[in-house]
Structures are given as structure tokens and as C-alpha cells.
Amino acid sequence: MERILNPQFEIELKLMLEAINLKYDYDFRHYSPASMKRTMVHAMERMGCGTLPILQKKILQDSDFFHDLIESLTIPVSEMFRDPTYFLALRQKVFPLLKTYPSLKVWVAGCSTGEEVYSLAILLQEEGLLSRTTLYATDINPRSLEKAEKGVFKLKMIQSFAENYQKSGGKRSLSDYYTATDNLAKFKSILKKKITFADHSLVTDAVFMETQLISCRNVLIYFDRELQDRAFGLFHESLCRKGFLGVGAKETIQFSQYAKYFDPFVKKDRIFQKK
């Protein structure tokens, strides 16, 4: 805490984020200052660097160190069917409306290691929508994307995933969707073939398609207000008329300049509909 409150640390952090942007074209300058400071201190400890200038020197000289840092900055932690009531609301209230479209595009922004996009693929399959849906899963972390594309998770994690799945209104057994070998669970190709994984930054990149549903959960809490507005602008531009946006349990569009373009659809589960 003492280090975070040190004005010198704040100056060094700003310089480091500028250097990262110039060297690697990754822009973290508008991430929430409080969470960025905590995350950077954790990264320093994990990577054995006593000061930010030492860490900066390492990552500028060695791209492997930089990608190690990305692991800390992008928080690649998730679980399948996280916040089950969100997925239950999609199943019961959103998907019946999406069934009116001849084809669907779903964007999972900040997909991390893939847990959420596979969860959505399973729900779409059970509601008879997967065959006419393309899911786009995007993230800025290439290592997370690589893991997500493999669709392989530790078997010991599956038990909690299965509990969430049942609470989300699961109609089968989660084990129907994966094969288990050597303490690993590999999700089946019927799910994977409908997912396109791609590098995309909410900070610097533009809209790349029109979608009917965007799920961006537990990403915006790491952005400052300016960057949140940019992300909501991208989502508004990407969504078709009456399209749906889902955000995390601690996130809301309410205070954004784009709030006037959305109506709460399932307020308690943070699902909004574009006007």
C-alpha cells in the first residue's frame, strides 16, 4: 500500500505505460489507475523486480517478459457459467427473441481463456440456435486466445463448472460436451467449429461486424470512465437494432454517455437492449 501511494511510483507507472504503448502498441493508459497500480505491484513481485524501472527495462528488452506482464494486466481468470442467473436470463428471456433471426452473430469481448464463449455455445446448442450462430471470441492476450482455441480445461475445474451449468438451466449433463483424458476435459468440435477466435482491443480497434448479442463481462471494471465510454460506443455501433448487451455483475452502462441508447432488459443480471 505504501508503494502504491508513493507519488514517484505513479510517475514511473505513467512512463512505463507510455513506453509499452510505443514499443508494443498495447495501450493500458486508460485502465483504472487503482487496479493498474495493484496489478503492477503484483506483477513486480511475481517477476522478481524490485522497482518499476527495473520491470520496464526487462519488458522493453525482452518480449517474453512483456507477454508475462500481459498475463497479469489482462486478468485471465474465469469460469464456465459464471453468475448462473445471467446465463439463465439469456436462455429464458433473450434467446427466445434471438430465434426470430435467420442467422446470429454473438461477440464475446475479452474472452480470456474461453470459459464464457464455450458456456454460450452450449446454451445456444440446447436452445436450437448454435447451427445458425457464429460466435466471435476476442481478447488482447495472445496466450489466453491460444488456450481458449484449444478448448481444454483441467478436469478438477469441471465440477464447479457443472454446478454452475445446472443452475443456469442446463438441460443435459456438462460431460456430454467434452471428452476426458489425462485429467483434462476437451470440449467437442460441435462447439469449437462455431467459434472464431481473434485478437481485438477495445482500447484501439474499431468495430468489425454487426452482432445481435455482445457479452463483455468483468472487463470494463478495469477501465477508467473515458475508456468505458469508448467500449460502450463500440458495442452500440456493433449491435443491430434491438440487439442485446450483457456486462458483469459490478458493471453498468447507466453512467455512460451511451446510456440513453439502451434500455434495461434484465436489470438484475445486467442485460441491456439497444433502442
Image (spheres, rainbow, N blue to C red):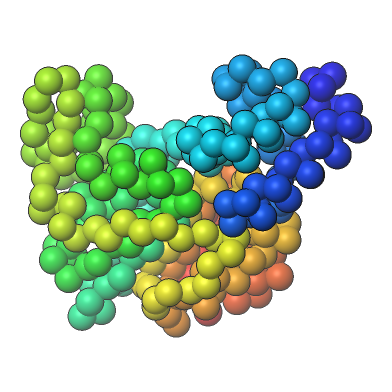
Residue that sits furthest to the front in the current view: 61
The spot of residue 176 in percent (x, y) is 8, 39
Residue that sits furthest to the right in the current view: 7
Which residue occupies the foreground of this view, 5 or 22? 22
Which residue occupies the foreground of this view, 31 or 169? 31
Residue 223 makes an appearance in the image: no
Residue 104 makes an appearance in the image: yes
The spot of residue 213 in percent (x, y) is 38, 66
Which residue occupies the foreground of this view, 40 or 193? 40
- Compared with residue 9, is residue 111 higher up or lower down, i.e. above or below? below
The spot of residue 109 in percent (x, y) is 44, 57
> Residue visible at 21% across and 24% down?
155
The spot of residue 29 in percent (x, y) is 71, 51
Q: Quadrant of residue 254?
A: bottom right
- Compared with residue 110, is residue 5 higher up or lower down, i.e. above or below? above
> Residue visible at 67% across and 64% down?
229
Taking 2 as reference, is 252 left or right? left
Taking 47 as reference, is 131 left or right? left
Taking 127 as reference, is 88 left or right? right
Taking 108 as reference, is 201 left or right? right
> Residue visible at 65% across and 71% down?
258
